Amino acid sequence: MADIAIFGGLFMAAFLAATLLPAQSEAVVVGLLLGGYLPWLVLTVASLGNILGSVVNWCLGRGIEHFRHRAWFPASPAALERAEIWYRKYGRWSLLLAWVPIIGDPLTVVAGVLRERFAVFLLLVSLAKIGRYLALAGVTLAVV
């Protein structure tokens, strides 16, 4: 039962970290890896949560035009504008930077705004998110 709570917490941390909310999941991943949990399970749960959070951003982007200038919206117009300029300049390949703090989350929203095909979005974001967690696990486990 404790493992369900632990992995549920990991999933939620990774999910929230991928949304526009200020959250991070790396410390949870490293803690679980150092705690002896199975690396493949930690990476799978974290990756799924993080990818799903980005999918939520993409879905938000699809309908954002109606809410973009509302006070409660979690991203500033300036941040979305920068991400849109970046996305238009570098195209869908910029989604490989979806893991990068500060710019990655708005990029996934902009991909929805600009109507990036979901299959392409999912493939590129998955590669980015899984790659980030694999690198984090590699560094963590190499140190131990």
Image (cartoon, rainbow, N blue to C red):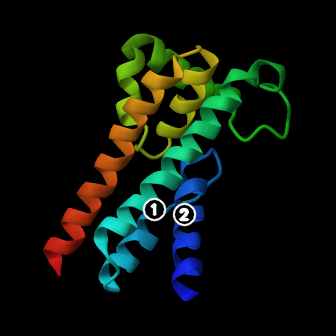
Quadrant in the rendering for residue 67: top right
What's the amino acid at mark 1? Answer: Val
Q: Which residue is drawn at 70% across and 31% down?
A: 60
Pointer 1 and pointer 2: residues touching (CB < 8 Å)?
yes
The reply, left or right, for residue 31 in relation to residue 143 is right
103 or 38, which lies in front? 38
Q: Which mark is residue 45?
A: 1
Expressed as whole percent of the image width and height from the top left, the position of residue 13 reads: 56, 64
Quadrant in the rendering for residue 78: top right
Number of numbered discs overlaid on the protein picture: 2
Quadrant placement of the C terminus:
bottom left
69 or 49, which lies in front? 49
10 or 82, which lies in front? 10
Q: Is residue 114 above or below residue 46?
A: above
Q: Which residue is drawn at 19% across and 63% down?
A: 138
Quadrant placement of the N terminus:
bottom right
Q: Is residue 7 above or below residue 117?
A: below
